[in-house]
């Protein structure tokens, strides 16, 4: 599913352009950000906890990107509603953007290359940025990173951000620019809903999607900027650039921070996860004491 906008009519004059623009007010598209979030379609808001009020709701088209600054204690659910999304994710610490998701440590520290429920997402400072607190997909990739301009151009004929087959790195760069960052700040990303496995010989195999309706939920442990690009996986064997939208909804769930630490949310934390959490809490306490 790609985003489509209607061709404007009668916009040759300023008055016509204004009238056309005002006609769009209140209109809905298949893929868009919903403001306020509570106005989103029922499929995005289904399953929210009792009393939860959504702070972000969006259906992100294939071939597009989005970014949002979110508060500590926010829980974000991404749903591969139509079964062919591939979401490349980056995290930056709000207010200290030099600290960001480090995929090498996210794999190395918890001794696990296949992210799923309970997996910590670590920063380059050894702090816990987010935890994967729910997952019905288990088809994710922390190893092969994002598609590139050169790779997409060779495979699909184009790879720029505004082309018919935008590369993930190009889209993530646009998202980073929204926060004053640039290409050098776009590191390896986590791919959600399209997975890979590694055999004993070191060969990487693309495992594809878990199918329609798979969902993953992240819990933020610090104020963060999330950048997402929904575009092809670098190992997707299909010759055509194809995919579907991903549904996103977020809500504030600070009580889940305590539940995670005590082990009642995803089970007891492994020592490495717990230490990263303590590193985060220690830093937050020190900052708040200034």
Image: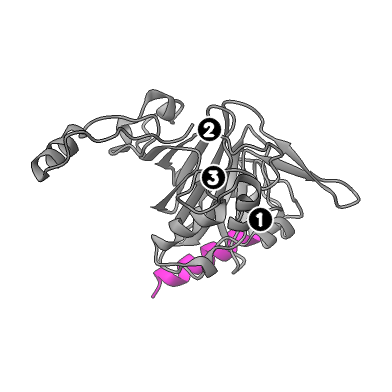
Q: Position of residue 71 (x, y in %)?
A: 40, 53
Q: Position of residue 62 (x, y in %)?
A: 50, 38
Rounded to the nearest angstrom, the CA distance separating label 3 from label 2 is: 13 Å
84 left or right, relative to 221:
right
> For the point 52% across and 62% down, which residue is it?
281
Q: Which residue is mark 2?
A: 244
Q: Which residue is mark 1?
A: 273
Out of 85 and 136, give the one closest to the viewer. Answer: 85
Tell me which label, 2 or 1, sits earlier in the chain: 2
Which mark lies nearer to you, 2 or 1?
2
State the SS at label 1.
helix
Give the dominant element type of the magenta stretch: helix, strand or loop: helix
Bin the neighbour count of mark 1 within 10 Å (Cα to Cα): few under 14, some 14-19, many 20 and up: many
Out of 89 and 54, give the one closest to the viewer. Answer: 89
Tell me which label, 3 or 1, sits earlier in the chain: 3
Give above or below for 229 relative to 8.
below
Rounded to the nearest angstrom, the CA distance separating label 2 from label 1 is: 33 Å
Bin the neighbour count of mark 3 within 10 Å (Cα to Cα): few under 14, some 14-19, many 20 and up: many
Q: Which residue is mark 3?
A: 165
225 left or right, relative to 264:
left
Task: Give the quadrant of residue 280.
Answer: bottom right
Q: Which residues are magenta?
A: 275-290
Observer able to see residue 223: no
> For the point 56% across and 26% down, which residue is it?
213
């Amino acid at each position: 599913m790609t985003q489509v906008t209607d061709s404007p009519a009668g916009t040759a004059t300023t008055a016509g352009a204004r009238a056309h623009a005002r006609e769009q007010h209140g209109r809905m598209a298949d893929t868009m950000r919903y403001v306020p979030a509570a106005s989103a379609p029922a499929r995005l808001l289904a399953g929210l906890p009792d009393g939860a009020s959504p702070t972000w709701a969006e259906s992100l088209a294939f071939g597009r990107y989005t970014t949002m600054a979110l508060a500590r204690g926010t829980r974000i659910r991404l749903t591969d509603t139509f079964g062919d999304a591939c979401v490349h994710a980056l995290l930056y610490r709000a207010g200290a953007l030099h600290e960001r998701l480090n995929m090498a440590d996210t794999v190395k520290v918890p001794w696990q290359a296949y992210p799923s429920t309970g997996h910590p997402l670590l920063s380059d400072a050894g702090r816990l940025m987010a935890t994967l607190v729910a997952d019905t997909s288990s088809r994710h990739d922390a190893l092969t990173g994002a598609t590139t301009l050169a790779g997409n151009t060779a495979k699909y004929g184009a790879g720029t951000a505004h082309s018919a087959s935008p590369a993930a790195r190009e889209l993530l760069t646009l998202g980073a620019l929204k926060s004053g960052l640039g290409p050098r700040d776009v590191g390896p990303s986590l791919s959600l809903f399209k997975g890979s496995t590694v055999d004993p010989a070191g060969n990487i195999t693309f495992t594809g999607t878990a199918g329609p309706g798979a969902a993953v939920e992240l819990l933020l442990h610090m104020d963060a900027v999330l950048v997402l690009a929904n575009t092809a996986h670098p190992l997707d064997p299909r010759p055509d650039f194809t995919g579907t939208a991903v549904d996103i909804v977020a809500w504030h769930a600070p009580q889940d921070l305590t539940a995670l630490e005590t082990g009642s949310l995803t089970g007891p934390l492994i020592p490495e996860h717990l230490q990263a959490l303590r590193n985060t809490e220690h830093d937050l306490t020190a900052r708040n004491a200034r």
